Image (cartoon, helix red, strand yellow):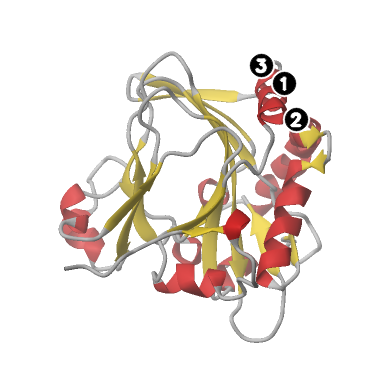
Amino acid sequence: MDEAWSPVVLAESSSSTETLLEDLWTGAIPYAVFPGFLDKSECSGVIEALKTAPMTTFKSGDALVSTLGVYLPDAVSDPDAYFARAAELEPAIASLLERGQGDVRDRIRLMFASHLKRPVVAATGPEGQEYGQGSLRVHGSGAGSSVHRDVVSVDAAGWNVAEMDAQFSAVLMLQPPEAGGELTVYRQRWRPEDDTEFKNKGAKGWDPRVVEGAQVATYAAAAGDLYVFNPTQYHEVPLTSGESDRVSMQFFMAFDFEGDGPVVTFS
């Protein structure tokens, strides 16, 4: 029988969780969650503000996906364009995420810092340029993500954040869909040799056979829930359905094991 693979609930942690990122990185836990991190009324405020935000919309299969924010793996070949676009979009994102108790991203960083006993700060480039700090995504009905991994050290090789020892994904659920859209994470880390046999040709993602037999954990986040996981492990988001879009905000986190340097955030 497989050993238990149980998440950590941050809101219930009465003691330090300094080893949280190490436990995520080694696969000892599938994810950590802070239920109800953001008040539902604050979530509704962000969703309402998104209606007039400068979103970019594209088709994913037969579904519509809208985004606001930069995504580093899509822009690795042009650092100047990436940082310029991040700076251009930052005022709109900051306006959306400035809620009653302050910028949601600052509150997330402060919460993680209190648990990790390390500073959590916005990542900056070699010349002091600030990386994008969060991407908002609206997945319409029928949208999702097939089995895949996010490995910044490979996908953004040469960038300073890619040189850090470990990376994570933090996701704030603003509105869950009526069905589907759950985090599904497998206890199996991507290996370069997987690409030869399992990488989908001409399409995103990997053949589901790559995670055959692996332990799996799922999490259906409610509005306001915040969770963090290790995206170098295979994961997916099942197709959504129903009238409610899946609306979320996410960014990466990275840090070095040695020393007491900061955890940095970027998107």
Question: What kind of element bears circle 1?
Answer: helix
Furthest residue toward top: 243
Q: Nearer the viewer, residue 66 or 169?
A: 169
- Image height of 174 relative to 260, above or below: above
Mark 1 to mark 3: distance in Å? 5 Å
Residue tagged 1: 49
Image marks 1 and 3: residues in contact by CB distance under 8 Å: yes
Image marks 1 and 2: residues in contact by CB distance under 8 Å: yes
- Image height of 160 relative to 227, above or below: below
User: Sequence-wise, which precedes: disc 2 or disc 3?
Assistant: 3
Q: Nearer the viewer, residue 44 or 251?
A: 44
**Residue 100, percent from left and from top:** 83, 34
Residue tagged 3: 51
Question: What kind of element bears circle 3?
Answer: loop
Mark 3 nearby-residue class (10 Å; few <14, some 14–19, many ≥20): few
Residue at position x 62%, y 54% from top? 11
Image marks 2 and 3: residues in contact by CB distance under 8 Å: no
Residue at position x 72%, y 21% from top? 49
Question: What kind of element bears circle 2?
Answer: helix
Residue tagged 2: 96
Question: Looking at the figure, which quarter contains the N terminus?
Answer: bottom left
